[in-house]
Image (tube, helix red, strand yellow):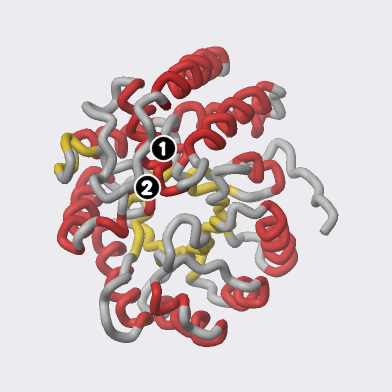
Amino acid sequence: MEVPLLKPRRTIEGCSAVLLPFKAPGQPDVEAWAGLLERTWAGGLTPAVNMDTGYVNLLSRAERSDLLVRAGQLARRRRFIAGAFIEGQTGDPGGLYSTEAVAIQEAGGVPILFPCSAVKQLSELALVEVFRSVAKECPEFLGFELGEMFVPFGRIWSLATFEALLDIPQLKGAKHSSLSRELEWQRLAVRDRRRPDFKLYTGNDLAIDLVRWGSDYLLGLSAFHVEAFAARDRLWAKGDAGFHELNDWLQYLGMLAFRAPVPAYKHSCAQFLFHRGLIATPEPHPQNPRRPASDLALLEPIAQKLDALVAAAQP
């Protein structure tokens, strides 16, 4: 396909997954997590909890529920997104998602339907019906396309399925994590033609400049440095050329952190936040793939450069 036209000087909606730090193997540092949540709001981004960056697929149902309740208490009417995760549960996916989504709504959050094995096996028509079931219970929720490089039960929808989902008014947007520019450009073209108010949140941590074509974002990479992403977004809205240098350094960080095996980016995030003095240890979830300790020497100069660019971008 032809490269679409850029959309300069637009206001970007930034959403950021929040890392769940660990004090030691198997011991979540919920207080540090709460601090990262507050930092995300303070930076001007919308936090997302119980997502891939928060190890949603490695937590127990009780742990996810506890984090949701805590997020709701911290929010004080501020917007946040939370994953509706049903992997491993038995029953009708539409009903299971609806139950989780209602709980998220009651906690004050916006539900996003995290992919699962049961839905991965459904036909396109049946998948759309799952979303229609949730729409009967939720006035506002989000969809989520996730590639198998992140989790084995991920699924990327066909373009026809994406277009069919646009007909559900309660579905306000969707996160797209295929790591493919072309697939995302295709969705933007359909969105712009069919339903311009629909939010397409890029989850492409290897192409974070997709915001230049009209995507908003819900990223794991933004969890590394919410202030840098917020500053970058302001520069784009102003038409300031500084956007490009800041974006380049953030993308350099993304290329390093999201190299194979991709799920190890969460350890990279812990290393980066530990270096910045925001969490107590660089430990990931004990079941998550790890990065070598030598990565810290690569992450440190990136952090220093981003801090300098953010300071220079202040009004």
Residue 172 x/y as whole percent: 51, 64
The structure residue drawn at horizontal position 44% and vertical position 32%, both measured from the top left corner, is 226
Q: Say what secondary structure mark 1 lies in.
A: helix
Q: Which amino acid does label 1 sit on?
A: Ala
Along the line of sight, which residue is nearer the eye, 134 or 186? Answer: 186
Along the line of sight, which residue is nearer the eye, 143 or 178? Answer: 178
Q: Farthest residue toward the right?
A: 2
Horizontal side of residue 12 vs 298, given as left or right: right
Along the line of sight, which residue is nearer the eye, 296 or 161? Answer: 296
**Residue 194 in sight here:** yes
Along the line of sight, which residue is nearer the eye, 81 or 305? Answer: 305
Tell me the number on the disc at residue 98: none
* Distance between mark 2 and mark 1 Cα atoms: 8 Å
Q: Which amino acid does label 2 sit on?
A: Thr
Quadrant the N terminus occupies: bottom right
* Residue 275, placed above or below residue 266: above
Sequence order check, earlier mark of 2 and 1: 2
Horizontal side of residue 206 vs 133, given as left or right: right
The structure residue drawn at horizontal position 74% and vertical position 44%, both measured from the top left corner, is 7
Tell me the number on the disc at residue 53: 2
* Residue 125, placed above or below residue 32: below
Q: Do the residues labelled 2 and 1 touch (CB within 8 Å)?
A: yes
Q: Say what secondary structure mark 2 lies in.
A: helix
Residue 179 x/y as whole percent: 59, 52
Q: Mark 1 points at which residue?
A: 223
The structure residue drawn at horizontal position 38% and vertical position 53%, both measured from the top left corner, is 52
Residue 199 x/y as whole percent: 57, 57
Among the 4 quarters of the image, the one containing residue 78: top left
* Residue 207, placed above or below residue 95: above
The structure residue drawn at horizontal position 39% and vertical position 23%, both measured from the top left corner, is 296
**Residue 314 in sight here:** no
